[in-house]
Amino acid sequence: MISLVLAIVSQNYIRPSVSNNDTSKCTSNINFTPSSNQDPARLASTSTNGELFPYSHTRLPQTIFPLHYEIYLHPNYAKLQTHGEIKINLSCVQATSFILIHAKDIDIQSVLITDFRQHPINVSKTLQNNYNDFYYIQMKESFQPDQNYNLEMTFISKISTEKLQGFYRASYRDMTGNNRYMYVTQFEAASARSAFPCFDEPGMKVTVSLTIVRPSGYQALSNMPIEDSIVLNTENNMVAVKFAKSVNMSTYLIAFAVVDYHYLERRQGSVHIRTWAPADKINYTEVALNASVKILPYYRKLFGIAYPLPKLDLIAVPDFSAGAMENWGLITFRETSLLYNPKVGTISNFERVVTTVAHELAHQWFGNLVTMRWWSDLWLNEGFASFVEYLGGNLAAPSLHILESLYMKEFIPAMQYDSYINSHPILQNVDRTTEIGALFDKISYSKGCCVLTMLQDYLNSTIFFNGLRKYLITYKYRNADSDDLWNSISSV
Ligand SMILES: [Zn+2]
């Protein structure tokens, strides 16, 4: 395939851009923290109250694991803050006398710990460390292995208007020129912790039951369908919207949105697909909706596993830092990646919508169903989605001949980026969350894509896809790393 594409492309060579995020989908929006003059070890070991912070590692300890989050969020949309409650079911695998959880810019107001008999376990001390976003809870008695516990916290978190991460407010102009707001999340890679306290590592998968309060006249969306809505009569007809319990998933894939949008809808088998946009742009989502309806059953056949959720929402976000984000069942898009106006849109605009939809739908399997154990294996998400988007995009819009552009759009930029002194291996160790953003680059996306293309050619398509199916079936709803992929393919 490569050599055939080479012949075609060599006649039409265009100098590629090597910008990190010019066309990338679901790029992380992590901001690099400028290197501080202060010693990192000192920052990591100092609590916000000046006390010594007793935990110096950057990753969570492997002593307790969360099983389920029950989250209640009551945003004050005028004051841009959220009063929240979270109940976490915990499983202890190794005795410990402390809980370490992520929280960023969150005011934690109360902590209650109980054992499986609902007997309270007293807390002797809590400490916060801003360097690693840790909240430390020292207990008066230890958790014991093979026992389950409950952690309940109340807190106040912020709705951001400056950073496009966490739970934030975006604005747009409606058809009458009035300014309107919508509220949405962007959690990848490590911003769920700024919306609610959580074990914010991809390997700490949980089921989630979410309730969020919305104003009347707005709709609330999340990963799962709505289960119940209750009007809070005392509060200007605000509505508490409860969503169905999710499948086992990583925190960075949790999403919710509060919008006064319109939608188009279609059924694909048992899946209810909707595309969401402001009223005057809703018809521009038709290309994305049509592509989704075609691609979803194609991936089901290609990967041997059905899309596991009952619904899929694709929503345009006016202020968005990446191209799109694959949140499970609620994919968020920059407007230019979801909306296509046939009157003024170019073929390139059309292709961007189709390939971004194909990319994000691929993530529903590669990334969402099977998730990298830690960010060092990000290429398992992005290399795969970048590779599969060509297959899905080709199916949805064969007239684009996008398979023939893979060499130009992935191989050449990857080679160019790889020639820089700051290039890195596809499998790159990262430790702190501030380092993760650097991995969302041409190496993880384009070089990852090219390696998989070469592997497919080397093994042949039948063996390659049988290996992928084995990998997905073996690790579904769980985590995997690169070795797990090689072992799955090798066994086939
Ligand atoms: Zn992606």
Image (spheres, grey):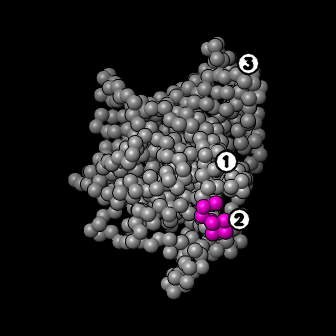
**Residue 424, labelled with which disc?**
2
Does residue 22 appear left or right of residue 242 in this picture? Answer: right
Crowding near the residue tagged with mark 2, few <14, some 14–19, many ≥20 C-alpha atoms within 10 Å: some
**Position in image of residue 250 (x %, y %):** 58, 41
Mark in the foreground, 3 or 2: 2
Mark 3 / mark 1, whichever is N-terminal: 3
Q: In the rendered image of this protein, does residue 321 appear above or below residue 152?
A: below
Crowding near the residue tagged with mark 3, few <14, some 14–19, many ≥20 C-alpha atoms within 10 Å: few
**Position in image of residue 53 (x %, y %):** 74, 35
Range of residues picked out in magenta: 456-463
Can see residue 212?
no
Q: Is residue 483 magenta?
A: no
Q: CA distance from mark 1 to mark 2?
A: 21 Å
Q: In the rendered image of this protein, does residue 364 appear above or below residue 388?
A: above
Instruction: Quadrant for the N terminus, please.
Output: bottom right
Does residue 271 appear left or right of residue 11 in this picture? Answer: left
Q: CA distance from mark 3 to mark 1?
A: 36 Å
Mark 3 / mark 2, whichever is N-terminal: 3
**Position in image of residue 485 (x %, y %):** 68, 53
Does residue 229 appear left or right of residue 20 in this picture? Answer: left
**Residue 480, labelled with which disc?**
1
Question: Is residue 435 or residue 2 the one in the foreground?
Answer: 2
Q: Residue at x 27, y 68 (%)?
A: 343
